[in-house]
Amino acid sequence: MPSNPGNYGEVFQDLRIDRRVRAKEAYEGVCSRSTLCRFEAGVSDISLSILIGLLKNIDVSTEEYFANVRNYELNINEKFLQTVSKYYDDGNIGMLKEMLEELRSSNKKYDSLRVLVVSILINDLDESFEVSNQDFKSASDYLMGVEIWGYSELGMLINIIDKLNINLACSITRDLIKTKKRFLVNGYQKTQLIKLLINVSYSCIKHENMHSASIFLKEAESLIATQRIENCIAEKYVLKFIKGYYYLILDKEKEGIKLMKKAIDNFKTTEDKGIVERYKIYYKEALEHAEERSKENQFDYFRK
């Protein structure tokens, strides 16, 4: 379980009480009374196997449990992201730095992700502000130490993945693929992972790390194939666009342009009215990237 057991334990306790299940009935045959008490109080962690046993005893599915966890975390993280977004949009570096100092003083490991988010936003507003290697390391260590990822982990990482050093982003994503079974406990988290894979694939293509892009695109495609399509329609269209970009940079211009244009047409059927314009801009950037790459290759050829 993640290092923020308070969220998970509190949600479990609420569900147990709602089902009118006594503590003894919940932990019997699974763990000790003290283990359950400490978990529900947010004092300590439990393993995935113990969690599954506890949920079985209170007749709650993992899908229902993590849906409740997600709702709990959404409230906390939405408030955080709304606050930092407002400060960022206002160019209020002072308040962002105050928030950063407050987060740095926290003894909660999962706050290392928030530290990295705020640091990156400050760096965007003030290039003289350096995001420390320790901030990257702390966030990376936390992410790799989490057994089950919730909204906090995936949501934060999706927001920062394109800002990370490309090698670090690829390293984290490869580790996620290796351990994905640990946290792909419901359809929502699967969709979150698909988003992350798509984002890091896009970054890889921009940095021309085509080998890693290929791996992540195939993994995203594989996950979409096992997901209910109504849960990831937008992701399916985005993946189509990114694959087009991938082909374009691999000098398969006709195939790449066809896929990107088809994806933009698909976006017109969604409820997001601004997405078509955004991807028209990305399409233009992709063409410019391909053109610059072609010129560089020609220059290298004649220089030889």
Image: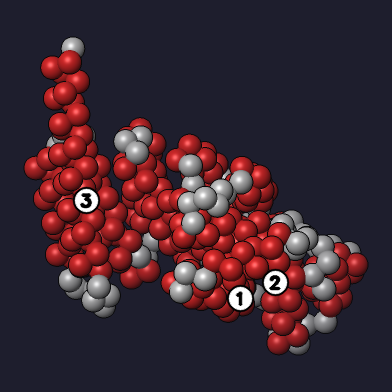
Residue 285 is marked as 3
Residue at the (55%, 52%) spot, across then down: 129
- Whichever of callouts 1 and 2 sits on the residue coming sooner in the sequence is 2
Q: Nearer the viewer, residue 174 or 22?
A: 174
Residue 7 is marked as 2
Q: Are marks 1 and 3 in contact (CB under 8 Å)?
A: no
Alpha carbon distance from label 2 to label 3: 41 Å
x and y percentages locating residue 123 in the rendered image: 50, 55
x and y percentages locating residue 262 in the rendered image: 14, 58
Residue at the (27%, 75%) spot, across then down: 272
- The relative height of residue 263 versus residue 90 in the rendered view (above or below) is above
- Whichever of callouts 2 and 3 sits on the residue coming sooner in the sequence is 2
Residue 76 is marked as 1
Residue at the (25%, 73%) spot, across then down: 274
Q: Judging from the image, what secondary structure is the residue with disc 1 in?
A: helix
- The relative height of residue 59 versus residue 146 in the rendered view (above or below) is below
| Crowd band around label 3 with a 10 angstrom C-alpha radius: few (<14), some (14–19), many (20+) | some
Q: Is residue 20 left or right of residue 201?
A: right
Q: Nearer the viewer, residue 204 or 39?
A: 204
Q: Is residue 110 left or right of residue 80?
A: right
Alpha carbon distance from label 1 to label 3: 35 Å
